Structure formats: C-alpha cells, structure tokens
Amino acid sequence: MKPYFFNSDIEAPFVAPIFSEKLLYKEISSSFDSVTTCLLLFPFGVESKRSLTLEEIGKFFKQFYGDKLHGKDLNDKKHIDWKSWDLKNFMTLAKTNPIKFLIKDEQNIEFFEYKNNIFYLNEKLYNEIDNNSTLLKNILDRLKYRNINYFNRKYMEEK
C-alpha cells in the first residue's frame, strides 16, 4: 500500500491517527486525478470548512480549470467547449467526478458524504485536520505537490 500524501514511513507517525491509518494508506488508484485533487484542496486550501455546497465546489472548479495548465485536463468529448461553460456545468463535473466516486468507494465511505447537494468531510477527520496546523500544512503541501506532479508528468512534452 502506498500512502496518498507521504513519501516515507518516517513522516506518517506525525499525523492524526484516523488520517494516517485509513485514508492516507489506501492504495493510490487511477481515479485520484486532477478533479479529485481539486476537490480535496478546496475544504482546507481556501478556508477551513467541514461541508461545501455543490455551488461552492462548482465555483472553485471553474476557477481551478480556468488556469491554462489545469484546463488541458478537460480534453475529452464530454468537456467540449468547457471554456464557455456556466457554473452549472462545473457543478455537474464535480458531482459526477469526483464526488460520485469518493462517496461510493468503500475505502472512502467513512470520510466523505454527499447529500442534498452538500459534500461533507467526516466530523472526526475534519476536527483532526482543523485542530492541527502542522497536519493541515502537510496535507495541503502534499496535495499541491501531487497536483503539480500530475500536470507536469501528463503535459511535460507540451511545455
């Protein structure tokens, strides 16, 4: 099992138990792509929030993919003319991927919930992260690194 955010077993003991034992050590799957990173960056990268409305997530996605490099990832048939999308289209993108997959994955079910167009982080997980600034910084650094690494690897030849 590879950790989501940690490069070595040395760093792992410095995080909160629920995060290190469960979420961080699940296998990295191909579904952990730019939209998943984008969604996970939002609750703590903008302001610390346990729940996000689909509209808030859609606005963040619109801003995130408005970046020239990030926008390259919206390159298949379902994303045609994405630059002219309104907020509703970005809300649909968030709902169909990654929210749908995060809440249906058995390994994630205890960490994420989605109901009435609101995406929730598990309360215990949220409190562990929100009350530990070192852990929060570490998670954000790792997510940002993962995001940069993803785009550099995927679009390196296009630079």
Image (spheres, rainbow, N blue to C red):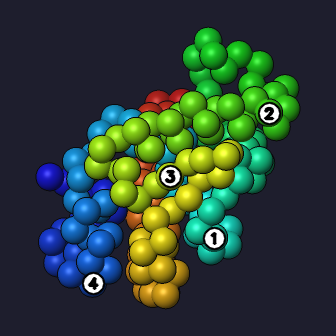
Q: Earlier in the sequence, mark 2 or mark 1?
A: 1
Task: Specify few, some or many for label 4: CA neighbours under 10 Å numbering under 14, 14-19, or 20 or more.
Answer: few
Q: Earlier in the sequence, mark 2 or mark 4?
A: 4
Q: Position of residue 73 (x, y in %)?
A: 57, 31
Question: Which residue lies under the disc numbered 3?
Answer: 113
Per the rendering, the mark at residue 21 is none
Task: Specify few, some or many for label 3: CA neighbours under 10 Å numbering under 14, 14-19, or 20 or more.
Answer: some
Q: Amino acid at mark 4?
A: Phe
Marks 4 and 1: which is nearer the front? 1
Question: Which residue lies under the disc numbered 2?
Answer: 88
Distance from disc 3 to disc 4, alpha carbons, whole Å, reads 26 Å
Quick one: which residue is furthest to the top in this view? 77
Marks 2 and 3: which is nearer the front? 3
Q: Position of residue 17 (x, y in %)?
A: 26, 78
Q: Secondary structure at mark 4?
A: helix
Proximity of marks 2 and 3: CB atoms separated by less than 8 Å: no
Marks 1 and 3: which is nearer the front? 3
Q: Earlier in the sequence, mark 4 or mark 1?
A: 4
Proximity of marks 1 and 3: CB atoms separated by less than 8 Å: no
Q: Earlier in the sequence, mark 2 or mark 3?
A: 2
Question: Which residue lies under the disc numbered 1?
Answer: 49
Quick one: which residue is furthest to the front in this view? 116
